[in-house]
Image: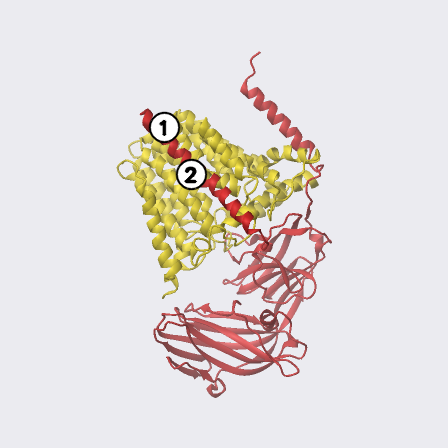
Chain colours: A yellow, B red
Amino acid sequence: MLVLVLGIVARIAIAPFTGHPADIGFLAVAMRLYYNQGIIDLRYFPTLPPLYFIELVVYAPYALLRDAGLQDPLFLYHTAYPIETVFLKLPMILSDLGIFLLLLRFTKSLRYAGLYLLNPFTIFLSASWGTYDAIMILPLISGFILLSQNKRNYASLAFALSGMIKLYGFVPLTFLGIQNLAEKRFKATLFQICSSAALGLGFISPLIIQGGLGDFYSGFVLRFVGANGAQTRTWNIFAALYGIRFGGASPFIIPTAALVVGLFLYQSRTGFSLKTSLLWTIVMAAVLNVFSQSEPQWLSWMIAPSILYGFFVGRDSLAKYVYVLGTGATFLTMTLTQGTGYLLAGLVSTQWLGAQIEGITDGLAVYSVTVLAMIGLLMGYLFIRPSKFKLEVAAVIFIVYAQAYFWFAIVNIVHLQ
Amino acid sequence: MKIRAYKILISLVLIMSALVIGLRGTSSLPNVYQTDTLQNVASVQGIGLGQQLWADNLTRSEIWPLNVPSIATANLQLNGSLILNVGFSNQANAQAVSVSHSINLSLDKNPIVIVQVTVSQGAHYGVRFSGLTPVGATFNAWEESSDLQHRPGLGTPENISANLQSQAYLANSQIPPPGSRITQISFYVEATPGTQGQYSMRVTSLQAFAQEQVASKTSSEISGSFLDVVMDLNLPATDLSLFQAFISFDIRGTSNLQYTPFLVNGTKVLAQGFTYVQISATAHQNAVLLPQLATTLPSILSQNSTQIIISAKSGQVNYFKLADLSFKYTSTPLQTQGLVDPNLANFLTGYYVLFLFVTPIVAVILVSKVFKSEN
């Protein structure tokens, strides 16, 4: 109970005063357009549609409160008001609590569940940034739990729902589809296809009606797979070391993703199992983080599935390691990709923790090298013989960070040709 | 009577759904505004190359003086192409070799200079212009952060275009007075600190053209060969701040086409989009323009009106059709600058770290200790 209270307190304490100015701004403007002007802004809403509908529901009481005279003065330079921000973040915070309760109920271990709820990265993403990865992870974890109870149809529904929120949810759905086909469970396959199509149509059709197929194809399908031609910022090692930003996913993503599917099939040659699906779902998250047009929040995709996998295979050290990974990811994201003041004050380039660790030269390289090392260590915890968790792993990560800091930020090695 | 959880859930969903439907468009929430119509577009024009104003046949080396630092070597040949071979030694500082040439181009004709150039990989290069006002004052028409400076050599031919009026504005934050002329062009090859070896620059074509405007006959669709596509807008007045602009369009161009959308008002960039490369999957594109992305100017200067400019960074636009435009305004825009009391900043940072790191980490340590003793 104390863990749950602390998890809620930590989130509620920081949620009103923080927020990613652009991401929270997108949500706030879309909700105000609906409740103030009556405009349904699905066509240019920056995510897949389910988030829009979820936010509409959760925001309604706030609109009612404002009409009842609630005063909500703007804090510093944020793009949304403090109480409004809390309402906008509520679906993410509630999803975190849902994941915690799912893990607790399934593992019957407060230690495992607590490692998720009290992970600084999950707090950071849901309560501070206001990004919606937890909303995708909730049905994803439900899917694996349902799969463990052999409720395949419900599991495929959960995975499809997860994929409708962020496309990563389709990874376990694909593995489950392969498993169904290989085991000649054609009814289950048919259900999987039909239910996914129905969910997809249900959520996507309003968007297509509003914007047309052309906008949907280029603005959603191609954008979400990083192939719409936009040269956006990319936070991976290749972008850092090549000195360029790929216009989407790096060319390495296709062979590496195919390799993951191949290894999943190879490991399943003697029979499919939940553990194999879960394992390669985590590995796919790692591959997407390293090789695609990844964003810092994608690192959270490995946390809850790793805790669940750690429980399934008795790798306590894995569940503990993802806590260290989350703590490191929070620090790196805060200091090297945003600057503390960005989420706290709503201002770009405000380094309140100190110029020595924020806004440094080649911060992208320091970030991506350290993240690569953390993901490499995660692979070790996943595949190498289980061993007792040692906190020294945090020191190893710090050494990698310090080395990257020295070579990239001080020596500036990228510009020494 | 036993109340089942699903009954509560269904009741909650019904209540919330009723709120969502009932409150639509009625709430007195903070002001937002969206204009979502093509009627705001007054005209669509393509900006391309018109009459040739000047060309150099690249044959007379005596009119291209060479500037070589003592630590570098250089050799210049002009035989229909300008070939500059340079040798750099390993130095702690950047080095550059340049060649320049006197020209006489009136800025009143809004000239665009087109250069075809190939530079070895490993070196960087750029092209710079300078000129004279009618009263004889000199001015630069190049700016350090412009796309024309410090370009990495690709080892393959590149076509560079420079709108000289825009370059002069970038350098001086104002348009030079009427009657001003561009009087010098120079190319340079440079090496970053620590770079050594032999590099070359080969200029195979150097021409200047007048800017030519082609107006769309249908007001939304245009075809030809353009460096920029300009849409004049009549946006309704609002006291709110721009949050985002969206533009949906079909575009086709040369294979090397890269373009950036801008929303400008006169010489002020209100919002900018990402740079896009042409993709084979579709000619359709949805671009978002954000005020916080506004960091550079488009290649042409806008007159005193609000315009969207699709500016080719490389290659040319052959076909453009506007499909939709949408502008969102808000009373709480994204700010790029502002002051925060340092004491408040320190307090907030401490508060943040306390709840983000200290509280959860201490709790996890305590929880694991509790479990350890239980075991």
Residue A178 in sight in this render: no
Name which residue lies at 70% across and 33% down.
Answer: A68
Residue furthest front in the image: B343
Find disc 1 in the rendering and name its residue.
B370
As displayed, is residue B120 above or below residue A298? below
Residue A271, visible in the rendered structure: yes
Residue at image position (47%, 69%) is B150
- Residue B36 or A2: which is nearer the viewer? A2
The one nearer the camera, A360 or B98, is: A360
Residue under the image location 41 percent in, 42 percent down: A327
Task: Give the amino acid type for the residue marked by disc 2 in the picture.
Answer: Val
- A198 with respect to B202 (left or right): right
Name the chain under label 2. Answer: A
Q: Position of residue A103 (x, y in %)?
A: 42, 29
Which residue is tagged 2? A171
Quadrant in which the C terminus of chain B is drawn: top left
Q: Of the residues shown, which amino acid type is indicated by label 1?
A: Val
